[in-house]
Every structure is written in C-alpha cells, then in structure tokens.
Image (cartoon, helix red, strand yellow):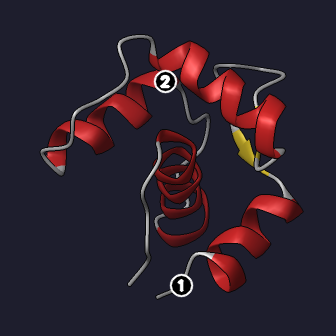
Amino acid sequence: KYNLSSGAEYNVAFVYYLEKIITERNISPNHIYTCYKNLGLKFPSNIRQSLIDTKNRKGWIDTSNIKDIKLTTVGENAIEQDLKK
C-alpha cells in the first residue's frame, strides 16, 4: 500500500500503524523493533537513534519521550498523502 524505501519511512509507517490503526499507547523503540522483525526487515543497528534521526530530519514523529513516541501531523500527512503508491 505504501512505497517505503528508507528507515525514516518505515519508522513513521510503524508509528502510524501502532498509533492510528491498532491504537497502541506508549510506543517505544521495542515496539518499532518488533515491527521490523515481524516483517522480516533488516532493522537499524541503533533503533533509538534511527527514531531520533527520523524526528530531526523529517519531523514525522515526536520522540521527546522515547517511551511514548507519537506521530506528528507532518508524519500523518506523509503516510496518508505522500508515501502512498
């Protein structure tokens, strides 16, 4: 459904899925790791840093509390508008 090609794109897609689709709360790097593993994708060697980089470079997620990662409006727009096939 989405055309994902980078760690940042996978990170925002996972946060979107966890927060908006299955309404998970208190999303942490462990949740993101599990997403990578369950899809059989190669995961970043430092998931925490990858998430912070996604925040700093794209603004798609909020990692101000790394144990409660949230999707931003910019991230929601990226998934719903920009990254669709």
Q: Secondary structure at mark 1?
A: loop
Question: Residue, x 16% and y 46% (percent of image)?
Answer: 38
Separation (CA) of disc 1 from disc 2 = 24 Å
Instruction: Determine whether, in the image, residue 76 is placed left or right of residue 83.
Output: right
Which image quadrant is residue 78 in?
bottom right
Residue 68 in view, yes or no: no
Question: Residue, x 42% and y 35% (percent of image)?
Answer: 32
Question: Residue, x 69% and y 25% (percent of image)?
Answer: 53
Q: Identify residue type, mark 1.
A: Lys
Where residue 25 appears, as percent x and y from the top left, is: 60, 44
Instruction: Determine whether, in the image, residue 70 is placed left or right of residue 2.
Output: right
Where residue 84 appears, as percent x and y from the top left, is: 53, 84
The residue beneath circle 1 is: 84
- Indicate which disc residue 53 carries: none
Q: Nearer the viewer, mark 1 or mark 2?
A: 1
**How many other residues sit within 10 Å of disc 1, few (<14), some (14-19) or many (≥20)?**
few
The residue beneath circle 2 is: 29
Q: Secondary structure at mark 2?
A: helix
